[in-house]
Amino acid sequence: MSQPLVSLRNIEKSYPIAGGRTWVLRRIHLDVQPGEFVTLMGPSGAGKSTLLSILGMLDAEWTGEYLLEGRAVHSLKPKDRAELAKGTIGFVFQQYHLLDGLTVAENLEVPLSYRNLKRSEREALVADMLDRFQLVGKKDLYPNQLSGGQQQVVGIARALIASPKMLLADEPTGNLHSTQAKQIMEMFQALNREGTTVIQVTHSESNAAYGHRVVQLADGWIQEPR
Ligand SMILES: Nc1ncnc2c1ncn2[C@@H]1O[C@H](COP(=O)(O)OP(=O)(O)OP(=O)(O)O)[C@@H](O)[C@H]1O
C-alpha cells in the first residue's frame, strides 16, 4: 500500500483544570490515504474541531506522533511546521474568516503573498480561481456584499489557490441553506475526484454521505466502527 498522507499515533491533548487535567483527545490513531474523503463526526465537545486544528497545524499544544507524507510534524520547529502546512494544507472554516477590508480577488491572493511568486504569476493564479469558481463578476466586491454561500465559495477558492494536497473543512456548510450546502458539498466531491484529499467535520448525515468513510469521536476517543 502507498504511504498514508496522514498518520496519527497516540495523539493526546488536555487542558489543566483545578486538581488535574481535562482530556480532549485520547490515544488517537488514524491513517488517511492520499485521495480519501474522510468525515469526522460525533457529539458536541467530542474533540472533532480540536483534531482538525491539530491536522491543520493551527494547534501545536498536543503530544504524540503526526506524520504528514512521512514528515514528522511532531519534531518540526514552528517555522518549519508553518512552511509545511502552507504548502500542503488548505483550511475551510464555518465562519469563512475572509478579510473584510479586502475584495474577493485580494482575499484570494492572501495565501500567495507568502510565496516567492512574481506579481504576474499571482495574478494569473487568482484569475484562474475566479474563473473556476465563477467569481469573475464578484472579484471587486467585499465579503459583506456577498451571500453566505458566495463567501464560502471564496473561502474554498482561497483554501485551494496554493494547490494543497489536503483540504480540511470544519462544518463548512454550518451557516448555509440546504441548496447552498449541496453546492458546496458537490464542490468538495469534485475536488476529491480530481485528487485532493478531504477531511471534513460535520454533524450532517447528508454531508457525510459525500465522503468515503466516517470516523466517530466520543469524549476524545475514536470509536471502533460497528
Ligand atoms: N481552553 C480550554 N480549556 C478546557 N477545555 C477546553 C478548552 N478549549 C476546548 N476545550 C474542550 O475541548 C473539548 C473538545 O472541543 P471541540 O471544539 O474539539 O469539540 P467538537 O467535537 O468540535 O464540538 P462541536 O461539535 O460542538 O463543535 C470540549 O469539551 C471543550 O470544552
Image: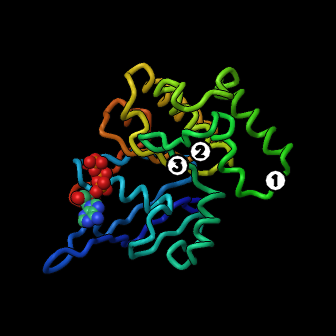
Mark closer to the chain start, 2 or 3: 3
Colour scheme used in the picture? rainbow
* Residue 117 falls left or right of residue 40: right
Please say whether residue 3 is visible from this viewpoint: yes
Contact between labelled residues 3 and 2, with CB atoms less than 8 Å apart: yes
Q: Amino acid at mark 2?
A: Ala
Ligand 1: image quarter:
bottom left
| x and y, in percent, of residue 154 in the image | 58, 34
Q: Which mark is residue 173?
A: none
Q: Does 59 sit above or below residue 100? A: below
**Closer-to-camera residue (116/67):** 116
Q: From where the camera sits, is residue 216 visible?
A: no
Q: Residues within 10 Å of mark 3 (few under 14, many from 20)?
A: many
The residue lying at 61 percent from left, 72 percent from top is 79
Q: Nearer the viewer, mark 1 or mark 2?
A: 1
Does ligand 1 reach within 8 Å of label 1's beta carbon?
Answer: no
Q: Secondary structure at mark 1?
A: loop
Q: Nearer the viewer, mark 3 or mark 1?
A: 1
Determine which residue is flagged by label 2. Answer: 159
Circle on res. 117: 1
Query: In the displayed structure, would residue 202 be above or below residue 145?
Result: below
Q: Amino acid at mark 1?
A: Leu
Q: Secondary structure at mark 3?
A: strand
Quarter the N terminus occupies: bottom right
Residue under label 3:
91
Question: Image quarter for residue 153?
Answer: top right
Label 2 to label 3: alpha-carbon separation: 6 Å
Residue at 41 percent across and 45 percent down: it is: 170
Task: Give amino acid for label 3.
Answer: Phe
